Image (spheres, grey):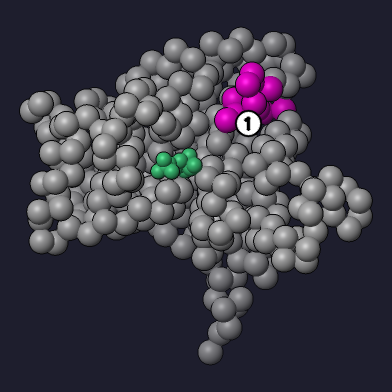
Amino acid sequence: MTTDTDESLLGITLETFLLEGMMAARARGRLTSLLNQITLAAKIITGRVRRAGLARALGYTGEINVQGEAVQKLDVFANDTLVASLRRRGHCRGIASEELDQPVTFEEATGDYLVLTDPLDGSSNIDVDISIGTIFGVLRCEPGPGRVPDEAFLQPATELEAAGYVIYGSSTILVLTTGASVHGFTWDPISGEFFLSHENIRCPADGNTYSINEGNAPAWPEAVRHWNAALKAEPSSTLRYVGSLVADAHRTLLRGGIFAYPADTKNPGGKLRLLYEAAPLAKIFEAAGGRASTGRGPISSIQPDSLHQRVPLVLGSRQRVEAYERAMQAR
Ligand code: P6P
């Protein structure tokens, strides 16, 4: 009888998985090293996220901790951790982040990659212990050193070399694609390693769960209201909405169904961000056989025109997303 720890140690760590993938592809190892730096940041962020409530429970103001250090807001902490980790190896020349008005660039870096990230999406949910997540994408760029123009970040999702997210939920899981397939790795708090736990994730072709904030219904376009009403009329339909993108996306990826955050009168261009939310998730869903759409066309083909632009986002089972797109065309 093996204990949990022994069982996970029999598995493949994320680092080993990446190394073996690199050797099989006879790659240079730069992307592998960069992804290992993101993994390191995820381990550090996990530790802080899981203790965050403790500070509040011990009565700290949440601003000054027992050492007299300013306790950073979690999303700023996550951002700074990713920046510090990615600066180290020189493969990443710059990062566009939801937390930064302008990208941070490492002029000394000689590598040829860029990172897009929402360091801690849904961090407002942490106070009530709802799952939150880190989303990331990796693009190619001209090799350094030197300054990186903002335009280098404005590439469609089809250009992503890798994409992934980390969900800080009942367990911490890192989901990653480098294009051909999608795999999930669960963090083991005892060894501190991520172990392969979800090999070759496939998004089911169909699913009865729909995920949308029905509180926004009065602001929806008529076509979305009709689509929603038709779904509710299906006896097998189930509504699940966490209000934390990575949690809703992860459930939809594994179970199938559909997640939608449409444009509405409150958010005419949509609420979610293209570069570091929709695009990496689109890469993941399409690699897993699912689909990612604005409701009128694929997310992947959108040519970004600004760093923080928003888009309507529909993710899920191919059949469900295609039905949504037909419903949008019908009106
Ligand atoms: P609403 C969280 O604030 C977030 O950015 C995403 O994680 C989530 O999908 C969305 O907003 C939820 O928005 O309007 O339903 O609260």
Q: Residue furthest front?
A: 218
Q: Is residue 327 left or right of residue 257?
A: left
**Residue at image point 60% right, 39% down:** 119
323 or 68: nearer the viewer: 68
**Residue at image point 60% right, 56% down:** 127
Corner quadrant of residue 157: top left
Residue 150 is situated, as x and y percent measured from the top left of the image, at 58, 12
Q: Is residue 308 visible to the viewer in this orientation of the structure?
A: yes
Q: Is residue 57 left or right of residue 268?
A: right
Q: Is residue 262 left or right of residue 45?
A: left
The three-letter code of the residue at mark 1 reads Glu
**Residue at image point 51% right, 58% down:** 130
Residue 28 is situated, as x and y percent measured from the top left of the image, at 59, 32
Q: Give the residues in magenta.
A: 90-104
Residue 12 is situated, as x and y percent measured from the top left of the image, at 54, 61
Q: Is residue 203 visible to the viewer in this orientation of the structure?
A: no
Corner quadrant of residue 242: bottom left
Quarter containing the C terminus: top left
Residue 120 is situated, as x and y percent measured from the top left of the image, at 58, 43
Queried whether the magenta region covers residue 98, the answer comes back as yes
Location of mark 1 (residue)? 99
**Residue at image point 57% right, 78% down:** 4
Q: Is residue 53 above or below residue 29?
A: below
Mark 1 residue crowding within 10 angstroms, few (<14) / some (14–19) / many (20+): some
Q: Is residue 211 above or below residue 104?
A: below
Q: Is residue 112 left or right of residue 233?
A: right
Where ligand 1 lies, by quadrant? top left
